[in-house]
Amino acid sequence: MTDSVGGPAPKRQPQQRKQVLLRLDPSVYDALARWASDELRSANAQIEFLLRRALAEAGRLPGGTGPLPRRGRPPRDTTPPE
């Protein structure tokens, strides 16, 4: 694949997660944090979960959106050593 100048196209880097500053009313944050705790999520993960659900319900979730990162400890590598 080539770019518009004729050279090889740069390799795409894996998408980095965006960092966003969000200002919330303290009582809204407290309610969100309690809800997140009830579902064993961080407040950040709860916000992302809710935003994705709202986007999907509105038909605005982009098709190339990856799945939510899994919660908890990563699965154990069960491949035998060589």
Image (spheres, rainbow, N blue to C red):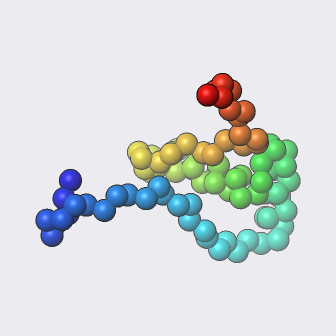
Which residue is depicted at the point 65% across and 74% down? 21
Which residue is depicted at the point 22% across and 61% down? 8
In this view, the residue in front, 32 or 65, is 65
Q: Is residue 58 visible?
A: no
Looking at the rendered structure, the number of numbered marks drawn on it comes to 0
Measuring from the top left, give residue 20's x and y in whole percent.
Answer: 61, 70
Q: Is residue 72 visible?
A: yes
Q: Residue furthest left?
A: 6
Which residue is depicted at the point 82% across and 71% down? 26
Does residue 1 lie above or below 68 as drawn?
below
Measuring from the top left, give residue 76's x and y in whole percent.
Answer: 72, 33
Quick check: 28 left or right of 10? right
Does residue 53 lie above or below 76 as drawn?
below
Measuring from the top left, give residue 37's x and y in whole percent.
Answer: 84, 49
Image quarter (top left, top right, bottom left or bottom right) of the C terminus: top right
Q: Looking at the rendering, which quadrant does residue 10 occupy?
A: bottom left
Which residue is depicted at the point 77% across and 48% down? 41
Quick check: 19 left or right of 39? left
Measuring from the top left, give residue 66's x and y in whole percent.
Answer: 50, 45
Does residue 13 lie above or below 78 as drawn?
below
